[in-house]
């Protein structure tokens, strides 16, 4: 549309690409609310200045759509992938009132969560508005969310309260916490009582005109507008918000997988929460679901569409983290299987494979909690490298020289990573460099092959060896030129 306007066309001459029938001059009528939240990289840059100003600090953003502000806001919160599934960070409950107010007044990336905590502590919207100059209209929405939390806590397994919570964007996980149940139990309760979402079309005209856009969002209301076709379909999971280590390469892979699926004769469906990608252009796929990439939200789409299978390998760590719970729920995973992901990401399984192949490696151990991590570090000896399993490069590696810092970092990683595992290994790559040339080449080749064998994994060590060992590069190029282009 911008190009058409640039060459001289006026709005009454340009067809609205969303409806395909009205002109761009037509005043939009919206029956949905969109919430967008920036994705900041302070989980990567922990010592960065979090205070917000005129400087650009976000690496990406999420977008969520709902029928009211509460619904779209809570869907956006759980799309951020910062370890939260509600407008709540549990650790803030221990923050002093003085510190809380300072964070509320001086805006930083997590201000929304501090303001929400202030609401939970009894500060009125008027008081917060006076401190922050945030409009009372929006603060009242946060108060409404808190009131629903209280209703849920007071009425466990009450179906009317459950419906109200779902209409306002509450996740099964949050409801489960308040009801002291599991998220799966809440899901089963919903399904048993037919409390399931419907999908509405994004059409810019509040359904006043027919729309050609296969672009949908979920809500707990009436009249489902997304109709399952008779054609077999494949669901591709996107990579969520752009952040350091997970960006445009996954969008590229997602788009090309869609083209391949369509060429094979299947209906291609994309699910993603990132508005900045080509894959979330509604003209790319046969259907687009703009939803959070969580187990609950993905299963809701699967229940409706009944796809032949789901592809997770092009969605980076976001989609890979969903592979195991989806497989356990009986969903067919196409492409890279969960067992292959585990063999690459589970430290114990991967080390066993290296030993079987007689490939040298630095000493390392796996831990699943802080105590195990400390014991493993003592056994290996400091300094150690702390690296979470089941991540690409979104959660930073840490070289640690003292136990005090080590324990702190372990606690931070436990909160950031959904699958709690750590690789503790010696930090000195120089020791790897002192291996015999033939050993180094063997180690390098195995790492490169591991990186391209249908499993998306971190390649930091590969890149280091590739840069510092020309014999490895030469031998690798001779044996398989395609590896260097992978």
Image: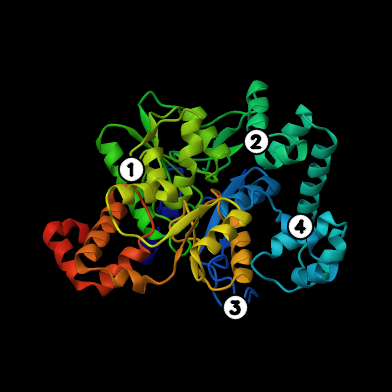
Q: Position of residue 22 (x, y in %)?
A: 46, 45
Numbered label attached to residue 183: 2
Marks 3 and 2 sit apart, C-alpha to C-alpha, by: 40 Å
- Mark 4 / mark 2, whichever is N-terminal: 4
Identify residue for label 4: 116
The residue lying at 19 percent from left, 64 percent from top is: 438
Q: Nearer the viewer, mark 3 or mark 2?
A: 2
Marks 2 and 1 sit apart, C-alpha to C-alpha, by: 31 Å
Q: How many other residues sit within 10 Å of disc 1, few (<14), some (14-19) or many (≥20)?
A: many
Q: Position of residue 305 (x, y in %)?
A: 46, 29
Q: Position of residue 82 (x, y in %)?
A: 59, 57
Identify residue for label 1: 258
The residue lying at 55 percent from left, 63 percent from top is: 378
The residue lying at 27 percent from left, 58 percent from top is: 448
Cβ–Cβ below 8 Å for labels 3 and 1? no
Between 438 and 85, the one lying in front of the other is: 438
Asked if 188 appears above or below 405 in the picture, the reply is: above
Identify residue for label 3: 54
Q: How many other residues sit within 10 Å of disc 2, few (<14), some (14-19) or many (≥20)?
A: some
């Amino acid at each position: 549309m911008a190009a058409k306007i640039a060459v001289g066309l006026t709005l009454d001459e340009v067809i609205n690409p969303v409806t395909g029938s009205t002109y761009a001059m037509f005043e939009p009528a919206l029956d949905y609310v969109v919430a967008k939240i920036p994705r900041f990289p302070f989980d990567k840059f922990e010592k960065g200045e979090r205070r917000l100003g005129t400087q650009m600090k976000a690496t990406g953003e999420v977008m969520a759509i709902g029928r009211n502000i509460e619904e779209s806001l809570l869907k956006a919160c759980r799309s951020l992938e910062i370890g939260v599934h509600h407008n709540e960070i549990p650790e803030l409950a221990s923050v002093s009132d003085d510190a809380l107010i300072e964070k509320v007044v001086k805006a930083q990336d997590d201000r929304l969560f501090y303001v929400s905590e202030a609401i939970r502590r009894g500060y009125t919207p008027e008081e917060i508005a006076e401190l922050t100059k945030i409009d009372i209209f929006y603060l009242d929405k946060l108060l409404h969310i808190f009131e629903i939390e209280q209703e849920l806590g007071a009425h466990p397994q009450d179906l009317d309260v459950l419906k109200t919570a779902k209409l306002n964007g509450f996740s099964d996980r949050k409801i489960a916490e308040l009801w002291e149940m599991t998220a799966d139990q809440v899901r089963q309760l919903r399904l048993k009582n037919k409390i399931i979402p419907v999908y509405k079309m994004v059409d810019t005209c509040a359904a006043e005109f027919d729309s050609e856009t296969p672009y949908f969002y979920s809500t707990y209301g009436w009249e489902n507008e997304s109709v399952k076709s008779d054609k077999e379909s494949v669901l591709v999971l996107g990579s969520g918000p752009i952040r350091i280590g997970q960006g445009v390469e996954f969008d590229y892979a997602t788009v090309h997988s869609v083209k391949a699926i369509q060429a094979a004769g299947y209906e291609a469906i994309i699910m993603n929460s990132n508005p900045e990608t080509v894959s979330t252009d509604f003209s790319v796929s046969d259907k687009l679901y703009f939803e959070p990439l969580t187990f609950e939200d993905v299963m809701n789409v699967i229940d409706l569409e009944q796809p032949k299978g789901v592809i997770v390998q092009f969605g980076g760590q976001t989609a890979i983290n969903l592979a195991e719970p989806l497989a356990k729920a009986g969903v067919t995973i196409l492409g890279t299987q969960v067992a292959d992901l585990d063999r690459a990401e589970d430290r114990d399984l991967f080390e066993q494979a290296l030993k079987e192949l007689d490939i040298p490696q630095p000493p390392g151990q796996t831990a699943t909690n802080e105590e195990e991590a400390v014991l493993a570090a003592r056994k290996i000896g400091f300094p150690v490298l702390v690296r979470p399993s089941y991540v690409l490069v979104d959660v930073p590696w840490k070289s640690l020289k003292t136990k005090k810092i080590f324990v702190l970092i372990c606690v931070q990683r436990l909160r950031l990573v959904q699958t709690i595992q750590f690789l503790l290994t010696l930090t000195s790559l120089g020791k790897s460099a002192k291996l015999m040339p033939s050993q180094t080449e063997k180690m390098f080749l195995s790492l490169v092959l591991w990186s391209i064998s249908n499993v998306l994994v971190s390649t930091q060590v590969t890149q280091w060896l590739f840069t510092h060992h020309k014999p490895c590069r030469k031998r690798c190029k001779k044996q398989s030129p395609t590896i260097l282009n992978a």
